[in-house]
């Protein structure tokens, strides 16, 4: 699908093997690794990643920081910290939107043209997939409408077909808005 100059796609699979300028990591505030996609990215990138992460001084929820990609095909990793789901009345949707916006701003600051997002907060942090997909797709499209010439390609990467179907539908709905 297309938003201005940007190709938007939902990709089913493992984000660690993808060849984008940057992949986004759903990290925790220490930025020192963990389980889920964070653990997979650290394993695939190799031990130099955690050394660079140690120099970053952590990251607040909703913000994003960049490192090199090391052994990944992606040149960069943008680490963002999603909110823990606590029922939805504690600013979780706004914080999740901020993760996507912050990551896009960091990528723009490095003149990156393609990036791949995992479904931030939808695993260990418990954010319901349909609500997360709506926030993710709307936030990215709002950014692209405001700044149409920045990115060539943006992917939402889902680890299973159920999540991919939810993101695909959310993306179609967000593009109609
Ligand atoms: N590629 C793509 N998506 C993946 C992969 C992968 N290799 N592995 C998991 N997912 P999670 P969170 C999906 O738990 O909820 C870590 O310990 C997964 O199916 O990785 O933001 C951090 O250090 C889910 O849909 O991240 C934090 O402590 C989505 O990625 C905490 O988990 C996000 O799941 C962050 O929790």
Image (tube, rainbow, N blue to C red):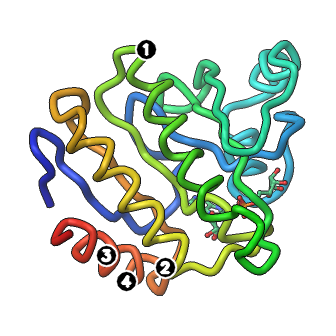
Residue denoted by label 4: 165
Residue at disc 2, secondary structure: helix
Residue denoted by label 1: 110
Task: Give the image location of residue 153, x and y in percent.
Answer: 25, 41
Real-space Cα distance between discs 4 and 2?
Answer: 5 Å
Residue denoted by label 3: 168
In this rendering, the answer to whether 107 lies above or below 164 is: above
Which one is earlier in the sequence, the residue at label 2 or at label 3?
2
Residue denoted by label 2: 163
Real-space Cα distance between discs 1 and 3?
Answer: 28 Å
14 sits to left or right of 46:
left
Task: Give the image location of residue 134, x and y in percent.
Answer: 43, 71
Q: Quadrant of residue 119?
A: bottom right
Residue at disc 4, secondary structure: helix
Q: CB under 8 Å between callouts 1 and 2? A: no
Real-space Cα distance between discs 1 and 2?
Answer: 30 Å
In this rendering, the answer to whether 141 lies above or below 93 is: above
Q: CB under 8 Å between callouts 4 and 2? A: yes
Q: Residue at x 53, y 77 (%)?
A: 131
Which label number is shown at residue 101? none
Task: Give the image location of residue 23, x and y in percent.
Answer: 50, 39
Rendered-image quarter of ligand 1: bottom right
Q: CB under 8 Å between callouts 4 and 3? A: yes
Which one is earlier in the sequence, the residue at label 1 or at label 2?
1
Q: Does the beta carbon at disc 2 come under 8 Å from ligand 1? A: yes
Real-space Cα distance between discs 4 and 3?
Answer: 5 Å
Single out the mark in the foreground, 1 or 2. Answer: 1
């Amino acid at each position: 699908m297309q938003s201005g100059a940007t190709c938007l796609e939902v990709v089913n699979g493992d984000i660690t093997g993808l060849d984008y300028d940057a992949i986004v990591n759903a990290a925790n505030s220490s930025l020192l690794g963990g389980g889920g996609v964070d653990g997979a990215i650290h394993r695939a990138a190799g031990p130099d990643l955690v050394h660079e992460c140690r120099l970053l001084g952590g990251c607040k929820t909703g913000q994003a920081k960049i490192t090199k990609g090391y052994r990944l095909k992606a040149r960069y990793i943008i680490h963002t910290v999603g909110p823990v789901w606590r029922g939805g009345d504690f600013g979780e949707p706004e914080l999740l939107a901020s993760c996507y916006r912050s990551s896009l701003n960091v990528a723009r600051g490095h003149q990156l043209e393609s990036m791949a997002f995992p479904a931030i907060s939808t695993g260990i942090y418990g954010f319901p997939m349909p609500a997360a997909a709506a926030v993710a797709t709307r936030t990215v499209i709002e950014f692209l409408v405001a700044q149409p010439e920045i990115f060539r390609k943006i992917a939402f990467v889902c680890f299973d077909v159920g999540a991919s179907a939810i993101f695909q539908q959310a993306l179609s709905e967000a593009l109609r808005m």
